[in-house]
Amino acid sequence: MHSSRLIIPVALAALTFACGKPPVEGGASAAPASSGTSAQVKQLMTARGLSEADVQAALKTYLPSGKLDEYLIFASGGQSGQVLVIGVPSMRLLKLIGVFTPEPWQGYGYGGLSDAVLAGGQQIGNKKLTWADVHHPNLSETKGDYDGQFLFVNDKANARVAVIDLADFSTKQIVANPLVGSDHGGAFVTPNTEYVIETSQYPAPLGREYAPIAEYKEKYRGLAMFWKFDRTKGRIDPSQSWAVELPPYTQDLADSGKLVSDGWVFINSFNSEMATGGILEGNPPIESGASQNDMDYLHVINWKKAEQLINAGKARTIKGIRVLPLEVAAAENVLTLIGEPKSPHGADVTPDGTEIVVGGKLDTHTTVYSFAKIKAQIEAGKFEGKDGFGINILPFKDSIRGQAEIGLGPLHTVFDDKGFAYTSVFIESVVAKWSLKDLKVVDKIPVQYNIGHILAAEGDTVSPDGKYVVAMNKMSQDRFQHVGPLYPQNFQLIDVDTEKMTMLIDGAIGIGEPHYSQMIKADKLKPISVYKMGTNPYTDEIDKFAVTPGKERIERKGNVVDVYMTAVRSHFTPDRIEVNEGDTINLHITSVEQAEDQTHGFTIDMHNVNLSLEPGKHENVTFVADKAGVFPMYCTEFCSALHLEMTGYLLVKPKK
Ligand code: CUA
């Protein structure tokens, strides 16, 4: 629209105006006249070593105190097991949402009601999972567009999916996949969030059983899980969920079809060789064994047909989940394959749903598949053969529209509102902008360095916004002050509304290693500010133990003590809890605040109890007072001038 040359003088004029120069044409009217500010700005630029382009970038990202960001990024927190919420264009970190791991500030996983959410993701008896490899956050959609209601995210390491409610930005549910041992193609939603899709990564015997590695081809399998999402309850319903068994080809990323391709899912794979390593046994390592073939397989799943077959009783139930067997999926063409260039990574459906863009890590192209051609060939039974599992293979050349020559190591692709695609190019360390119309690269911008995922403003919906692209880089040498050998990750904000893409700002991410992220227009979110008094946030109902002011009490039945407590500025009632050593204590605490941002915290010395009591929130904590002593309890949020006085004692009398 406007070239960067035009913007610089305008931007500088805006800056000088802000400093008191007479208004330029089109500026606001009531500026006091003074002189010399332009020189001041120039001085400042010289002193700070800033170019005009730097000033322009600063003007596009700077938010004066009190101004709000236009977009929010929901970013994978990687190994932290959390989700990061980041404002755009400021790149300010707004929140860490505890998801798969405890998050102390939110009191998530420290004795209160949230413990049950975390427990939902535990699977193997005595192995308590205290970390996750968070990969791909996905916002709920209505008609293929973000609706701002829910966020889903997967844990690659332990094959889990979490549901986060964006009414209060807290994690409500974690489901562990009982069938597979890792996932990658998740947590992608269908266009109306009927399902949350989770596809496996490393094949294993379904149901988490044992089989010798020599029986890899016979017994090891991939899986596409379709978790049924109940939007009215805001929870996944495992009893209505089902899966499609896949060949052991190491499925990678996935994307749902939309609009014309609604009802279909596209999944990459990268080890059609079925290499299983065995270096000590004299075999090549998996990385080279898996890179022998020139082509791997794009998996095309007709999920609406799969759903019909599941409902018609064609499934085999494994660990309580209905699984459509591979032979049925193949015979019914629920699953078909198409060649895709070497070691693909991203499979991204275009905003209009007509095409699928695949990037190949070891190829220099992105390949653009035509959904119409794919569908027509499946319907006409036009296949070039079958793979070793009896799955029909569509001819590659007749399934694509063409290929775009991108550069070294294209990974992921997102889209704007003007018909352009943006592909992250790992080895070349650039973002490549190319035209979907003629598949020609029109611009490249270097990134620092080695970009993995990429995101754009609403860039994977039916109506992308353009404006911003974020490069999610894997390395950041020379970008930040050194903080030891583990460097920050670097999210670079790029302006894509300028004729040439322009780098705006480096966003240091101190928690890693992030994978995918999504960016939503902030005004689509409608978060609450306070809970209705006595709300259990994990049932979204008034808790049956909720306490109202004046009804605080301590009840003893044998060696069980129920404490009904309220928290309000600046005291807990009761503030003394006297029990006997060995008693079981059920603590019920309601914050009876209803004022915005008036949060209290609650902790007890040496008991690892730590709660966040946002206005109206209720918490239940159960523990055994197994050590005699005097244990201070206090409010952990600086809630008022008398915050330090918001305290009390747990007094545990010793056994005689
Ligand atoms: Cu309540 Cu500090």
Image (cartoon, rainbow, N blue to C red):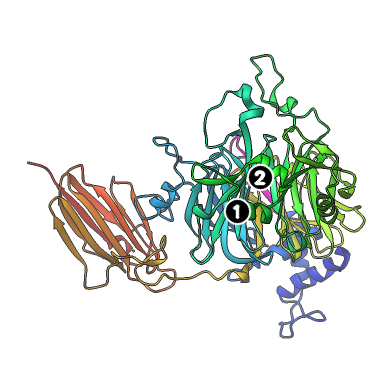
Q: Is residue 634 above or below residue 549?
A: above
| Residue occupying the point 40% across, 50% down | 109
At numbered mark 2, what does the secondary structure look like: helix, strand or loop?
loop
In-front residue for pair 66/83: 83
Left or right relative to 317: residue 327: right
Q: Nearer the viewer, mark 1 or mark 2?
A: 1
* Residue 138 numbered mark, or none: none
Q: Position of residue 231 (x, y in %)?
A: 54, 64
Circles 1 and 2 in contact, beta carbons < 8 Å: no
In-front residue for pair 6/352: 352
The quadrant of the picture occupied by the N terminus is bottom right
Residue 490 covered by magenta stretch: yes
The mark nearer the N terminus, 1 or 2, is: 1
Q: Position of residue 198 (x, y in %)?
A: 61, 48
**Crowding near pointer 2: few (<14 within 10 Å), some, many (20+)?**
some
* Residue 312 numbered mark, or none: 1
* Residue 480 numbered mark, or none: 2
Task: Say what amino acid the circle numbered 1 marks.
Answer: Ala
In-front residue for pair 649/342: 342
Left or right relative to 601: residue 549: left
What count of labels does the image hold?
2
Q: Main secondary structure of the magenta part?
A: loop
Q: Which residues are magenta?
A: 480-492
CB at disc 1 and ligand 1 closer than 8 Å: no
In-front residue for pair 337/285: 337
